[in-house]
Amino acid sequence: MIQDIESQVAEPIQTVVQKLEGWLDTFIGLIPNMAVTLLLLIIFFVLAKLGSKLFRELFSKASNNEALEHLFSTIIYGAILSIGLFIMLGVLGLDKALNSLLAGIGVIGLALGFAFQDIAANFVSGIILAFRRPFKIGEIIEVKDIMGKVTRTGLRDTAIETFQGQEVYIPNKDFLQHAFYNFSVLGKRRIDIVIGVSYADDLEKVEDVVLSAIKNLEGVIDKDKIIFDYSEFDSSSINFNIRFWIEYPGEPSYFTMRSKAVKAIKSAFDEQDITIPFPIRTLDFGIKGGQKLSQMELNTNGVTNEVN
């Protein structure tokens, strides 16, 4: 009875021992290959860094596109490490495991693609922007009501320094999904000003005075493209628009030039006795069904008189 129990216990123990001995023999046999693999790992890490650095130096001489430089240097770095990984798995005899690993990576990549689709969209958008280059560092752009100077471009986002002194990070996909403005491409910008004059003023004289004031203003360009037009009859004034061009970006800035234009027009109006009216309300009691003011009785100090 005791011998039967001992034989039943000894059999699984012997099996475990044999397995451990087999694994130990396999491990000892793989030590040379593992040493070679470790050496290859170090070599390919060094090669990846050297390859990436060499590409950056060569690319910087041919182009100043930092986004493309970062993209391709990262691809080269990853490609060299991937080649090293395949070689190291072959040295260890894990070719079959490699196929399983690639299949697993495919499944994981699909799952991560759904989970991080916004990140992937920004990354792909960054690659497209890097090739198209619709704006450069230092240029003035506006997207989704955010306006400022581009300070950094990346594969996921773009940094903009606003005129209020804040740095804003814009996801790259916003540049492909929404309209954005680049104020630095054409090198100029138009200023639109709306002003009203009195109904009593001569409109031809007003136009001549305004055009003369703007044309004589330092900083105005394309003076033959200045636009003057009357737009509407307002409650107390006749409104007009004056549109003119300035160099942009640069000095004088947009806000400075707009301020100078307003002051120049106001000074010219004062010299020519042209009125910018205050709001006026006219009371008319002679509408249909009502009574004219001249026919109404006026009660002063309790005495009723008729207004003639």
Image (tube, grey):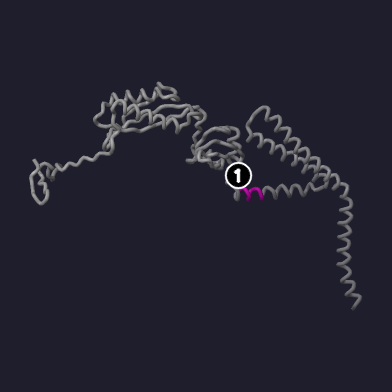
Q: Position of residue 278 (x, y in %)?
A: 28, 37
Magenta region: 108-113
In this rendered view, identify the residue nearer to me: 133 or 285. 285
The x and y percentages for residue 61 are: 68, 27
Q: Residue at x 45, y 32 (%)?
A: 256
Q: Nearer the viewer, residue 190 or 303?
A: 303
Residue 116 against residue 252 in the figure, above or below? below
Q: Secondary structure at mark 1?
A: helix
72 sits to left or right of 147: right
| Name of the residue lying farthest toward the top | 224
The residue lying toward the viewer, choosing from 260 and 114, is 260
Looking at this view, name the residue that lies furthest to the front.
301
Residue placed at 41% from the left, 30% from the top? 260
Callout 1, which amino acid? Ala
| Residue at 36% in and 24% down | 211
User: Given the current orientation, which residue lies at the most extreme bottom position?
Assistant: 1
Q: Position of residue 56 (x, y in %)?
A: 70, 33
Answer left or right for 182 relative to 86. Answer: left
Q: Does residue 260 appear left or right of residue 95 in this picture?
A: left
Residue at horizontal 88%, vertical 75%? 5
Residue 220 lies, in percent from the top left, at 43, 25
Chief secondary structure of the magenta portion: helix
Quarter holding the N terminus is bottom right
* The quadrant where residue 43 appears: top right
Along the viewing direction, whichever of 307 and 185 lies nearer the viewer: 307
**Label 1 sits on residue:** 120
Circle 1 Cα neighbour tier, 10 Å, few/some/many (<14 / 14–19 / ≥20): some
The quarter of the displayed image where residue 282 is located: top left
Please check the rendered image and state whether residue 256 is part of the magenta-colored stretch, yes or no.
no
**Does residue 17 appear to the left or right of 150 in the view shown?**
right
Quadrant showing the C terminus: top left
Seen in the picture, residue 304 relative to 159 is either above or below; the reply is below
